[in-house]
Amino acid sequence: MKIAELFYSIQGEGKLAGVPSAFVRTAGCNLSCRWCDTDYALRASEAETMTVPDVVEAVLAWPARHVVITGGEPMLQPHVVELTERLRDRDRHVTIETAGTIFAPVACDLMSISPKLSSSTPRGPGHGPQARHHEASRINIDVLLRLMARYPYQLKFVVASPDDLGEVRQLLQQLGDPDPGDVLLMPEGTDRQTLRDRATWLIDLCKETGFRYCPRLHIELYGHRRGV
């Protein structure tokens, strides 16, 4: 497996925010989000190659029952199913963080799906081919529905502007209008002040819609850096 980093921290986002968790950050991604905050995990060629037993051994060294497999895009990894099954065999709660564009029959207790809105598409000179690929690939309704039908899930949207809410609503209609309690709105940003500024209007949107507000606790606690 291509591994960008392994670390032990708390879950900073989603329904399990605040839970001590071991993180397996895989390397490589099929998208090119313009606000990606883990760009060091995009290049599999720069990552460490580890066997599944080595990853499991490293994870089990920490006292966490919860394991988060993230990326990059972990569903790209050819051995991700084996990794999740081995972790489940060791009584670990497994969260997968994915954009929801690729399906794999993983063993998963919480499928954390983050569909990418149009605001994620790269912009500006030199991004033409990259932007076209991203825009064509960022939403796969069939895969989203398949993941939602098979696993306990949360839909986590990165929101940069109140205008994004219309796009969120349209996508949710295509997905059968899931329970608002499974829909999380998270402010885009990698510094505390930006997150707080966007939280002021994003929380109001959550109150209007019944969607859940999703903090980024790791940034509030540690700032924007690796290994936290």
Image (cartoon, rainbow, N blue to C red):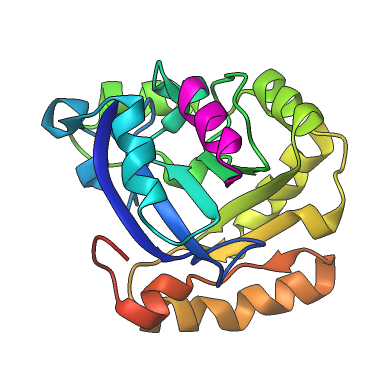
Which residue is most to the left? Answer: 46
Please tell me which residue lies in front, 6 or 165. 6
Residue 116 at x, y = what percent? 53, 41
Residue 141, by quadrant, is: top right
Which residue: 46% across, 28% down?
Answer: 83
**On the rendered structure, is 49 left or right of 157?**
left
For the point 41% across and 72% down, the residue is 218
Q: Quadrant of residue 222?
A: bottom left
* The stretch drawn in magenta includes residue 87: yes
Residue at 51% from the left image edge and 30% from the top image edge: 86
Please provide percent x and percent y for residue 80. Answer: 46, 25
**Image position, residue 131 (x, y; %):** 34, 29
Q: Is residue 36 visible?
A: yes
Report the magenta residues as a range: 82-93
Quarter occupied by the N terminus: top left
Task: Give above or below for 223 relative to 139.
Answer: below
Magenta-highlighted stretch: main secondary structure?
helix
Q: Nearer the viewer, residue 65 or 141?
A: 65
Q: Nearer the viewer, residue 49 or 170?
A: 49
Is 142 positioned to the left or the right of 216 in the image? right
Q: Nearer the viewer, residue 68 or 128?
A: 68
Residue sitting at 71 percent across and 51 percent down? 166
